[in-house]
Image (spheres, rainbow, N blue to C red):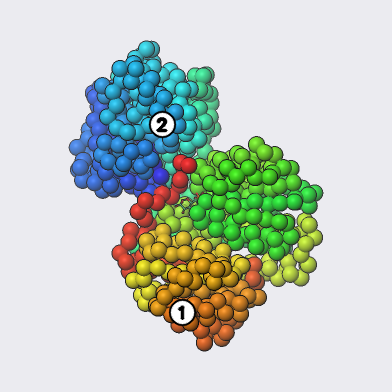
Amino acid sequence: MCGIVGYIGDEQAAPILLEGLKRLEYRGYDSAGVVVARGGKLTLTKTRGYVENLVAATDGGLRLPGTVGLGHTRWATHGQPTDENAHPHVSDGGKIAVVHNGIIENYAKLREFLRSKGYHFQSETDTEVAVNLIAFFYAESGDLKLAVAQAARRMEGSYALGILCEDCPDTLIATKKEAPLVVAVAEGANFLASDVAAILEYTREVYRLQDDEIAVLTRDKIEFFTGELDPITKSLEHIDWDISAAEKGGYEHFMLKEIAEQPESVRKTVFPRIRYGRVVLDELDISDEYIKSLTHIYLVGCGTAFYVGAAAKYNLEKLARIPTEAIMASEFRYSAPILGATTLVICISQSGTTADTIAAMREAKARGARVLSIVNVVGSVIAEESDWTLYTWAGPEICVASTKAYSTQLALTYLVALRFAEARGALDAAEYDAIVALLQVLPDRMETVLQNREQIQYVSSLFFNREDIFFIGRNIDYAVSLEGSLKLKEISYIHSEAYAAGELKHGPIALIEDGTLVITVAAYNKLIDKTISNAVEVKSRGAIILALTTDNGKAALSGVADEIITIPDTHDVLLPSLAVLPLQLFAYYVALARGREIDKPRNLAKSVTVE
Ligand code: G6P
């Protein structure tokens, strides 16, 4: 979603800000802008559409002189994605400029208040309310830091703010609440950013701002204050991931690169947590007694992370024998879930900043449950606030459509299921050992599946022009179907739905006509025959069957399917890790054939920080 970058140093700011904005593009946005200060004057440029438009409008930033500035990519919430609604926003009179991520929930009330004080508004945004509120307090005291603190106290909702004022053009101010913001130290310059990716080219030394804290940046100094303006000292954090991880490295799209990285990401996530044939989760200071006491587990997440939960539900129930439910975070938070000391809520999130998942986590804690999170971004809100956190070591995921986060999250759910099964004595030793052994060769088997890219590209070329594509599967295959269908619609814009195969005849079968493509996921050994029966039902009504099965299942499907893609055999529990790969590649190649913006699909955002 929205992205912020700020620079104060000796170089011309605008080209640096534009570079930073490009690195934030992956988050999804629909307009962009920059503001720079020079000689007591603010200069602003903002455009609808991609950062490229801004680059063109400013000659790569060269037309904007000044060595201090702020940049922003906006994903529209309040008001259309227009030039006017793009950030930065300036106060009435143009003295103060602000970039903002998040939503100010009481903006309507604040706008009325400010109107009553004579302030005028140009846009429909909540951000213009924030900047005018700061301007209102600044007019009273002439102290920008104080004005920011006073305004922050009156704003409800979430915000990360970068602030620049023409009266103090050698200072940037930043504050935040429930939206990420880092402040970073570089050689001869200081930065602020909503995401470290924006500034990694210049520095790896960052301070993470906590809620209500205020940072005051000058060229050679950064000072931190509490919301009450008491000075505080913060510690620097060194970011050690490689910038090349955030670059395409020869691949046409980040998505293809990230698909290819999955075996290695799963290795990094799983191998250090298996020792001498046992799952060891050092990070979880969790007792066997607590695990034994559990009566219910909720798996909570959004989008792809929710579909990891959908798969993990089957495995947790199968292996650990604990009643488990996967539920979308947006539903969970308002459903009055029955929670208590014997309920565990597992929050799954790549970014760790998804608004609904954060709210679900807080709801769970407030109702007395413990929260275990599976998160990719270190130090993110969900990681910090959970009782326990397991990090996926996927590295930065840039493509909006999630692939390597899915695979690593899934891999961690296997480890949790095994750990819980062991603590509860729910799984016999031979099966435990078999699963662990197969987990250790899982990345190799994933590589084998990915080597089959050409066949999947060929199959995609047969079907890329369909308007409706259905996915069916049972049990764990159904969970994978949900993710396959989501991938396809996200990046190809083809209408697609996934159904539990047994449910098909209770309604959706009415949609099957001559030539409808039904992707049949039939990898789960125990239910292959049942799924084949459902495939036959749709085939006899004219459907074309593209089957995804294991080497073992191929013979059974060959009489039914028009095309078959196979994956290697493995333990049933681990099948989703292999089955999802051809579906990701299918979505990718279909989208490629349709000429879609694969890494930045329309209307979608990488990190959804609003409800
Ligand atoms: C957005 C993204 C999805 C992602 C979901 C959850 O909708 O477009 O790709 O799965 O958010 O994100 P999270 O960061 O919580 O995993």
Element at label 1: loop
Q: Which mark is residue 389?
A: none
Query: In the displayed structure, would residue 509 be above or below residue 169?
Result: below
Residue displayed at 34% across by 33% down: 125
Determine if residue 317 is in view: yes
- Name the quarter where the N terminus is drawn: top left
**Within-10-Å neighbours for mark 1: few <14, some 14–19, many 20+:** some
Q: Amino acid at mark 2?
A: Leu
Residue displayed at 47% across by 57% down: 402
Point out residue 17 in the picture as x, y percentages from the top left corner: 32, 39
Residue 231 falls left or right of residue 428: left
Quarter-wise, where is residue 279 in the image?
Answer: bottom right
- CA gap, disc 2 and disc 1: 57 Å
Query: In the displayed structure, would residue 20 be above or below residue 278?
Result: above
Residue 287 falls left or right of residue 5: right
Element at label 2: strand
Residue displayed at 41% across by 31% down: 161
Point out residue 201 in the picture as x, y percentages from the top left corner: 38, 45
Point out residue 238 in the picture as x, y percentages from the top left corner: 51, 41
Q: Amino acid at mark 1?
A: Arg
Q: Which mark is residue 161?
A: 2
Image mark count: 2
Please name the residue that numbered disc 1 is placed on: 541
